[in-house]
Amino acid sequence: MRPLNKQTAQKVQRPERVIQFGEGNFLRAFVDWIISNMNEKTDFNASVVVVQPIKNGMVDVLNSQDGLYHVNLQGLDKGEVVNSFRLIDVISRALNPYTDFEAFMALTEQPDIRFVISNTTEAGIAFDPECKLDDRPAAAYPAKLTQLLYRRFCHFGGDMQKGLIIFPCELIFLNGHKLKEVIGQYIELWQLGDAFKAWFENACAVYATLVDRIVPGFPRKDINHIKEQLQYDDNLVVQGEAFHLWVIEAPESVAQEFPADKAGLNVLFVPSEAPYHARKVTLLNGPHTVLAPVAWLSGIDIVRDACKHPVVGRFVHRVMYDELMPTLDLPEDELRRFADDVLERFTNPFVDHQVTSIMLNAFSKYATRDLPGLKIYLERFGRLPEGLVLGLAAIITYYRGGTRPDGAPIQPNDAPEVMALLERLWQRPTLREVAEGVLAADNILGEDLNRIPGLTDKLEEYLSLIDKEGMLAAVSRYVGND
């Protein structure tokens, strides 16, 4: 079996135009895969310099393979099974700024550099006042980026044509707005001057983005078979689902410079990320959150099996299409296409997604993913969305603990204060008190939800039905109302 490097596999030399903070599975299976497609199908013609954002990382492994690796996409695409491999050759080199700070800073002096892309985890975009301009490097990602930008400003004498376009991919809402704000804080903290501030604000641009692709990562279980199939000793194979979506809150001029949409990719340049964020949270995360406890308490362990179940599958479909979709403000045909894609992703034959993995911190997830839809539905239609109420009843029942009918242990996992509250409430003598107590927990759900007309009664009704007849019977009663 051959090693994977530029001696054994073809690698095209292209100008370094992208700095990428992060070498992990997601960026390599998403952003670098997108750039690979852009290089093939458009005149983008760019390579990527990867910067390791923390002291310990995997740039050495990347460099040992000359930045080459395969992306294995698996899933369904319009009902067709996808299991494809693509050799990614866009990474020119990888740097560790903690061991080679000067090489890191020298990137700013390359005139072709135009884009900065990052994924440094949700905690990565944060202001750390301990960071200093002369740190080698500064610890926080926004501080490192400010160091780079200031060096570029100084090297090119404030040339307005040498600004950078910055796409953060961290999973926080309006990530670009937050990153720009934090860079502004460092400009003030380090007293970098009005001229640099004006250059950053006018020559550079930081755009909010929304990324969506499930990336399981390195296929440890199947790697030997995959290597035999590829005939390469690739230790950086990364698996991802076939679906991908990148929403970028940027004008058409940016789309012309970064022509991902022209490569036939699902990359949208839009005036506002907000409705697409709401769509993802509502139609993907929302159904996931209520599917998990309903499925588990019905004796179903895998998301795919829940969606294909004759009763629970109807529950998922009805919650998604009939209760959550009408609360969104994008065109119905667009929402329906997205929902269809979500269901296809849920039934991915290559991913055994355990429903218990979704149950972590279920109450806070319900508060952000489902509760807004419940309120909007009630406001628009004058009645409660019963599937979402049933989902909340299922979460509360799951947190009761014990075992389900087949003997499998129920093991809720949440913040200590949430666990303590549910333990106390389940010791109350009536289900009415349980319902009232959960809905009154404004530290969990944000407000006293007993004030929502009819919610306490309906929640008590479903808690009682689950308690007396079981979860599957409660779901059957709900879907029987079709």
Image: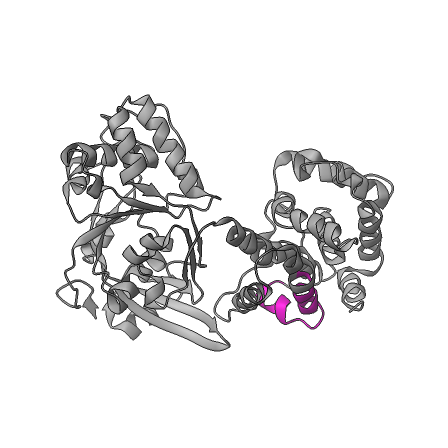
Nearest the eye: 25 or 297: 25
The x, y position of residue 262, in whole percent, is 33, 66
Q: What stretch is highlighted in magenta?
A: 301-319
Can you tell which quarter of the image residue 6 is in?
Answer: bottom left
State the quadrant of the N terminus: bottom left
The x, y position of residue 394, in whole percent, is 72, 53
Residue 277 in magenta stretch: no
Nearest the eye: 377 or 216: 377
Nearest the eye: 460 or 165: 165
Can you tell which quarter of the image residue 444 is in?
Answer: top right
Residue reaching furthest to the bottom = 80
Residue 318 in magenta stretch: yes
Horizontal side of 164 relative to 286 (left or right) equals: left
Compared with 432, 240 (above or below) is below
The residue drawn where x is 84% and y is 52% is 461
Horizontal side of 47 relative to 273 (left or right) equals: left
The x, y position of residue 244, in whole percent, is 43, 62
Residue 299 appears in view: no
Horizontal side of 385 relative to 52 (left or right) equals: right
The x, y position of residue 426, in whole percent, is 78, 42
The residue drawn where x is 37% and y is 36% is 180
Horizontal side of 14 relative to 289 (left or right) equals: left
Compared with 290, 133 (above or below) is above
* Magenta span main SS: helix
Residue 34 appears in view: yes
The residue drawn where x is 75% and y is 40% is 449
Q: How is the model colour-coded?
A: one colour
State the quadrant of the C terminus: bottom right
